[in-house]
Image (cartoon, grey):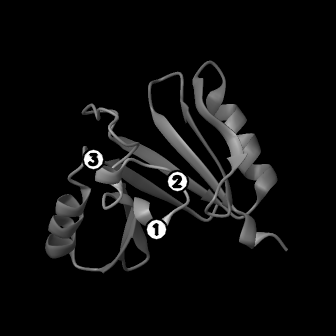
């Protein structure tokens, strides 16, 4: 596994939150908006944050405004993101975490060049797994 990172989801105010955390914690900030992706979204959501990263030393916090117009519930707005350097390991961990849980997005190739999936484990913890296809040797 390459790294584990918290992924914080917001209800349309991600940019404000990211700027606040950047001001408080410092680090290097990168923001990608929905308009910068191939994902079809409503006009009023195009300037929202699709994905942001705040890198502090060798640690990373990740953020998003989440799915367009999907209600964010406290408790559901924090997920654990696992990034893998090995596809087989990623699939094994995903399947193990999914046992007696619920897959919310099956593993699939995404427009950002990764194999990605999401699940809710049997304890109610939300997980995101990611394997960058550019890491293939």
The first of marks 2 and 3 along the sequence is 3
Circle 2 residues within 10 Å: few <14, some 14–19, many ≥20? few
Residue furthest to the top: 100
The number of discs equals 3
Q: Is residue 21 above or below residue 63?
A: below
In which quadrant of the rendered image does the N terminus lie? bottom right
Circle 3 sits on which residue?
10
Circle 1 sits on which residue?
36
User: Foreground residue, 110 or 25?
Assistant: 110
What element does badge 1 sit on?
helix
The first of marks 3 and 1 along the sequence is 3
Circle 2 sits on which residue?
39
In which quadrant of the rendered image does the C terminus lie? bottom right
Q: Is residue 77 left or right of residue 4?
A: left
Q: Is residue 69 above or below residue 21?
A: above
Circle 1 residues within 10 Å: few <14, some 14–19, many ≥20? few
Q: Is residue 105 above or below residue 129?
A: above
Q: Are the residues flagged by discs 3 and 1 in contact, CB closer than 8 Å?
A: no
Circle 3 residues within 10 Å: few <14, some 14–19, many ≥20? many
Residue sitting at x 70%, y 42%: 107
| Residue 123: x %, y % from top left | 47, 23
| Residue 83: x %, y % from top left | 60, 59
| Cα–Cα span, label 3 and label 1 | 19 Å
* Quarter of image, res 21: bottom left
Q: Is residue 11 above or below residue 113?
A: above
Q: Are the residues flagged by discs 2 and 3 in contact, CB closer than 8 Å?
A: no
Residue sitting at x 14%, y 71%: 24
């Amino acid at each position: 596994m390459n790294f584990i990172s918290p992924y914080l989801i917001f209800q349309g105010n991600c940019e404000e939150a990211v700027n606040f955390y950047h001001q408080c914690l410092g680090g290097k900030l990168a923001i990608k908006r929905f308009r910068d992706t191939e994902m079809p979204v409503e006009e009023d959501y195009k300037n929202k944050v699709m994905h942001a990263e705040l890198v502090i030393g060798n640690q990373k916090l990740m953020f998003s405004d989440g799915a367009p117009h999907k209600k964010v519930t406290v408790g559901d707005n924090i997920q654990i993101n696992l990034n893998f350097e090995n596809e087989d390991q990623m699939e094994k961990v995903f399947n193990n975490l999914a046992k007696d849980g619920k897959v919310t997005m099956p593993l699939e190739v995404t427009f950002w060049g990764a194999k990605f999936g999401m699940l809710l484990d049997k304890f109610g913890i939300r997980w995101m797994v990611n394997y960058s296809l550019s890491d293939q040797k």
